[in-house]
Image: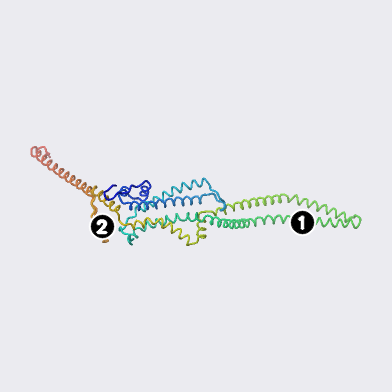
């Protein structure tokens, strides 16, 4: 806007966009001072930056949650998950941007001085709480991204430890079942060894008997007993073959089942690579103070626009805005009498008078009053007419008994 004493700078597209991000009035800012234009552009820049950081943090958090689990040291990017996380990050960034825009736009200018009074602070507490929540949700994913290398190394060690623990627990669960099978094997083996030892003993006696003396009745008896025991041993093997096959099959089945469970243990250990575990490790690696200051940085970025607006000194932008508001109220017939009365609690309240609405109400009241008067007049004239008809034709109104 050109004036003899001052020419308002013409804003560019970026500055106008930042004004919209700050929820400010571009029509007024175009006619205001360059200082006002820059202040509200900076406010919009902070809001845009917060939305961008929220988009990055939200997208990275979703990618960490849904990416295929594996060793923490495995590199590479899973493209489908990255695309989904990017889409969510954009939506999440726009949500946070819109919330921040509302918070900044809804935050008043306080008393128009640099000082932040207690009353201004109390009135801003709900917006400050919302800003704190947003800042914390943004800072945590950013923390785990900042310390990703250290977290990956630590997480890999945690996965190895967990895998060993799971393997030990899994094997312990199968020890008793393998022991039962081994006991059955051992029982059959012991019974067979008894027969085998008896056969060996008789064979030894028979060999000595034949070597020392000529074969006689004793040697024949030993030979017969040896054959009998040999048949008994063969019969024992035949009788117990199904049981041995069953035990071998059960042992092989348990071995396969154990191998499958051990293979699952790797997946279980890899499942340790989640968002919550990474946040815990980030706190462990960085320490309480570093984590606190990182969170504090995002809190400061998020809350700066709120405190900044409370510290703003009233400028031409504010006075022109107040003037336009008064003009709009006057154009619509709205009158405000400030501090006009006190409520039951003793607080001063403004009296708002809507003259156009009051005029409509007065017109409606006058119309209803006129309609009532006309109705009364019609009734009175009807009564007079009926009286005249009665006087002229009284016999028509008298019925004979």
Neighbourhood count class around disc 1 (C-alpha, 10 Å): few under 14, some 14–19, many 20 upward: few
Judge depth for marks 1 and 2 and give the one in front: 2
Residue 177 locus on image (x, y percent): 65, 55
Q: Spot the residue most to the front.
A: 4
| Foreground pick, 296 / 376 | 296
Residue 17 vertical placement versus 110 (above, below): above
Residue at image location 57% in from the left, 55% down from the top: 156
Between 19 and 109, the residue placed more toward the observer is 19
How far is disc 1 from disc 2 in space, using C-alphas? 107 Å
- Determine crowd level at label 2: few under 14, some 14-19, many 20+ residues with C-alpha closer than 10 A: few
Front-lying residue, 218 or 181: 181
Q: Which mark, by number, is residue 349?
A: 2
Please tell me how many numbered marks the rendered image carries.
Answer: 2
Residue at point 8% right, 37% down?
Answer: 392
**Residue that lies at the very extreme toward the right in this rendered image:** 214
Colour mapping:
rainbow
- Tell me residue 38's x, y (percent): 35, 52
**Toward which corner of the image does residue 160 lie, by quadrant?**
bottom right
Which residue corresponds to the image point at 66% horizontal and 55% vertical from the top-left? 178
Observer-nearest residue: 17 or 223?
Answer: 17
Give me the disc on residue 308: none
Q: Which residue is mark 1?
A: 193
| 224 left or right of 69 in image | right
Whole-percent x and y of residue 85?
48, 48
Check disc 1 and report its element: helix, strand or loop: helix
Quarter of the image with the C terminus is: top left
Would residue 45 be found to the left or right of residue 143 on screen? left
Q: Secondary structure at mark 2?
A: strand
Indicate left or right for 154 with 6 as reference: right
Q: Is residue 205 left or right of residue 181?
A: right
């Amino acid at each position: 806007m050109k004036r003899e004493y001052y020419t308002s700078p013409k804003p560019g597209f970026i500055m106008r966009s930042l004004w919209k991000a700050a929820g400010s009035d571009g029509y007024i800012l175009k006619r205001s001072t360059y200082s006002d234009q820059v202040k509200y552009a900076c406010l919009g820049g902070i809001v845009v930056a917060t939305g961008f950081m929220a988009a990055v943090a939200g997208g990275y958090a979703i990618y960490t949650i849904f990416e295929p689990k594996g060793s923490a040291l495995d590199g590479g990017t899973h493209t489908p998950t990255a695309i989904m996380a990017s889409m969510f990050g954009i939506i999440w960034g726009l949500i946070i941007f819109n919330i921040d825009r509302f918070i900044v736009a809804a935050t008043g200018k306080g008393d128009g001085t640099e000082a932040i009074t207690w009353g201004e602070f109390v009135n801003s507490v709900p917006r400050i709480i919302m800003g704190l929540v947003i800042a914390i949700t943004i800072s945590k994913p950013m923390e785990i991204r900042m310390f990703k290398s250290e977290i990956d190394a630590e997480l890999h060690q945690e996965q190895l430890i967990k895998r060993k623990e799971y393997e030990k627990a899994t094997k312990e669960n199968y020890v008793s079942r393998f022991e039962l099978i081994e006991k059955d094997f051992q029982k059959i083996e012991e019974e067979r060894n008894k027969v085998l030892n008896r056969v060996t003993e008789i064979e030894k006696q028979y060999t000595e008997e034949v070597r020392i003396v000529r074969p006689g009745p004793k040697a024949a008896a030993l030979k017969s007993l040896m054959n009998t025991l040999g048949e008994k041993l063969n019969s024992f093997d035949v009788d117990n073959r199904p049981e041995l096959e069953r035990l071998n099959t059960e042992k092989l089945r348990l071995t396969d089942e154990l191998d499958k469970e051990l293979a699952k243990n790797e997946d279980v250990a890899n499942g340790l690579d989640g968002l919550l575990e990474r946040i815990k490790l980030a706190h462990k690696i960085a320490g309480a103070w570093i984590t606190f200051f990182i969170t504090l940085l995002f809190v400061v970025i998020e809350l700066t626009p709120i405190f900044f607006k409370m510290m703003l000194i009233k400028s031409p932008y504010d006075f022109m805005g107040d003037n336009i508001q008064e003009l709009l109220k006057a154009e619509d017939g709205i009158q405000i009498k400030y501090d006009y009365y006190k409520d039951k609690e003793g607080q001063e309240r403004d009296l708002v008078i809507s003259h156009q609405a009051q005029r409509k109400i007065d017109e409606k009241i006058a119309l209803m009053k006129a309609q009532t008067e006309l109705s009364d007049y019609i009734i009175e004239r009807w009564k007079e007419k009926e009286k005249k008809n009665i006087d002229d034709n009284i016999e028509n109104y008298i019925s004979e008994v």
